[in-house]
Image (cartoon, helix red, strand yellow):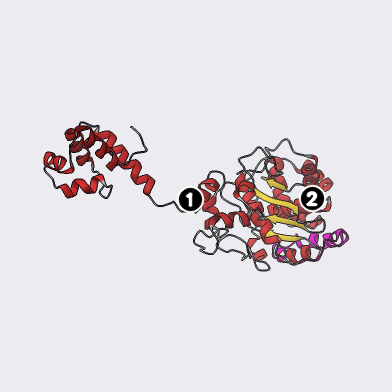
Amino acid sequence: MSVELSPGQLVQAAMDRKGWSQSDVAFALGTTKAAINQIVSDKRAISHNMARSLGAALDISAEELATAQALWEVKRADEPDSNINARARILSRYPLRDMIKRGWIDPDDTTKPLEQQICNFFSVSSLDDVPHLSHSAKKTSYDSIPPSQLAWLFRVRQIASEMVVDPYQPSALDGLLDELAEMKLDPTMVRRVPRVLSQAGIRFVVSECLPGSKIDGVCFWLDERSPVIGMSLRFDRIDNFWFVLMHEIAHVRNNHGKINPIVDIELQSPDLNVISLEETLANEEAANFCVPTNKMENFFLRKKPFFPEREVIAFSKIVRTHPGLVVGQLQRRMDRYDILRQHLVKVKDHLASSMMFDGWGDIIPTER
């Protein structure tokens, strides 16, 4: 069968081979000449029943006629929505539906096609330049970051790029560490963290992570004097908050993440055995901030395997930290996440009182 011929042309060719007119075919089928004329001129679709009738009368394949009709209809169908290709390409790699649910992308925005919104989100000019979507073998600094984590990273970047903060001053951050240390005594004091980081020139963004991404935080730089710390608050516990925050601050203080962003996943997981020197350093600084390492080691060795609550509280007062930070370290050292859990108090609501969150039902408006 030639797919070049329309259904009507196939019928006409069969009529010509038999030397029949439209009236002859109409007589054979018991229908009207007008009906056959509409079929031959492709003004009337050939139904499956009609295909079998024409096949019997003209000695041609009913299947050939039905196939020709289907191909003809597809060829004449309207062009698909231009957003379909963009949706399909993004869906193949990124959690687009979650991104839409979070309000990062608006599929109903008639002023900006979906493809344009995706390109704006990733700060590129075409879909071919979106990380993980390129058809070429071109490597980027984002190749090692899974798409769901990368989407979150770019959302943090999008928010941070619109924040107004003075240039970063390393000396200013060093001078504010003592103030941060005082805040870890009282869960309500976390509300002051955004102001302190802003004073040092650090953009601080809190954005709920996408489902399944297991991301805790990120450190990257918009330019030489514009570091960004992003946190997901994946676990709303005082120990996790301070450990992740100080881990990212350590990255900033040591100028990590200037070339490639550092995305931190499951920071406090005991199963992560192989980590980089940068991560080792940040882990050590964060743990020492939460509870001085030498004092924590001494307390642990003296008291293990039993840690009465009253002694944990007394020790936390000595090292001037909240008991939850001591409990968090004890749990990880012992691989016992059931002990003294009542001290792992929540901090998210306190932090939300002093800054906007992106997630948990809210969205930070951005221009792009």
Q: Nearer the viewer, residue 235 or 13?
A: 13
Q: Which residue is mark 1?
A: 84
Give the number of the disc on residue 258.
2
**How far apart are the alpha carbons under marks 1 and 2?**
36 Å
The amino acid type of the residue labelled 1 equals: Ile
Identify the mark at residue 61; answer none if there is no mark. none
Give the residue displayed 21% in from the left and 37% down from the top: 15
Residue numbers of the magenta segment: 165-190
- Which residue lies most toward the right here? 171
Residue 331 image point, x, y percent: 68, 45
Image quadrant occupied by the C terminus: bottom right
Q: Earlier in the sequence, mark 1 or mark 2?
A: 1
Q: Left or right of 149: which side holds 190? A: right
The answer, for residue 214, to whether it is visible in the render is no
Which dot, 1 or 2, sits closer to the camera? 1
Quadrant of the snapshot with the N terminus: top left
Residue 139 place in picture, x, y as percent: 69, 40
Residue 352 position in % (x across, y down): 64, 65
